[in-house]
Image (tube, coloured by chain):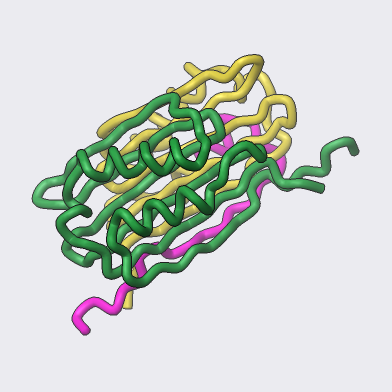
Chain colours: A green, B yellow
Amino acid sequence: MNALGKHLLLELKDCNKEVLNDIGFLRRSLMAAASEAGATVLGESFHQFNPQGVSGVVIIAESHLLIHTWPEHGYAAADIFTCGNSVQPEKAAQILIGKLGTKNHSIVEIQRGILDIGE
Amino acid sequence: MNALGKHLLLELKDCNKEVLNDIGFLRRSLMAAASEAGATVLGESFHQFNPQGVSGVVIIAESHLLIHTWPEHGYAAADIFTCGNSVQPEKAAQILIGKLGTKNHSIVEIQRGILDIGE
């Protein structure tokens, strides 16, 4: 009984506050994480908030990468959801952690789509 | 010590298989769920897979709504991530469950961004 998807929920604390408010940097970071993890990018949507904060998502053939940032708290919530065995979500997570200068992080892994296939 | 965001992870099983492959229907459903929950839509990205399946995300001022579907299994993974008290994520969840004809669902709620603010 396998899961269809693997969902990593990243709590990224004590990050570089400047990059958390830089929509261009965050977009490039998610794209780099997707690419280096072996994912195929299909679409994206990023938004800059006023006075601060960014939300952004990259839809990949294997599901998505997503981030919401709170620069005032040095915090970002990021999700990496993948299906199949061709991508390395943990690699994408490490790239994001590095690019954001995260000093304190935790990752929760949740299996999505645990189905009784073949019943 | 409050969380910045509330993240609902919806496991939607035994859904109407036809609507799970209808990108227009799914887009309208996520938009309706966002709207009726009181959210403000800022952006979106939807993709139709071949031979089947849809991935889609709606970025809202209060975070995001997102879905990945596997019509062949009658299954969808949906996420509703909100911050602030102005939106009702549970209402969005119920709308999605209804529109997809889901006969078997579970919802996991995860607090995101539990920070020691003010330390």
Residue at the location (22% across, 54% down)?
Answer: A20
Residue A46 is inside the magenta segment: no
Residue at the location (17% across, 46% down)?
Answer: A22
Q: Give the quadrant of residue A28.
A: top left
Q: Which residues are magenta?
A: B95-119
**In the current view of this chain or complex, which residue is farthest to the front?**
A36
Q: Give the quadrant of residue B2.
A: bottom left
- Does residue B39 appear in the picture of this structure? no
Q: In the rendered picture of this protein, how many numbered marks are placed on residues?
A: 0
Residue A75 vertical placement versus A5 (above, below)? below
B102 displayed left or right of B24: right
**In the current view of this chain or complex, which residue is farthest to the right?**
A119
Query: Is the N terminus of chain B in the top left, top right, bottom left or bottom right quadrant?
Result: bottom left
B11 displayed left or right of A31: right
B65 displayed left or right of A72: right
Residue at the location (20% across, 53% down)?
Answer: A19
Q: Name the residue nearer the viewer: B48 or B15.
A: B48
Residue B15 drawn at (x, y percent): 68, 32
Q: Give the quadrant of residue B32.
A: top left
Residue B109 drawn at (x, y percent): 51, 60
Query: Is the C terminus of chain B in the top left, top right, bottom left or bottom right quadrant?
Result: bottom left
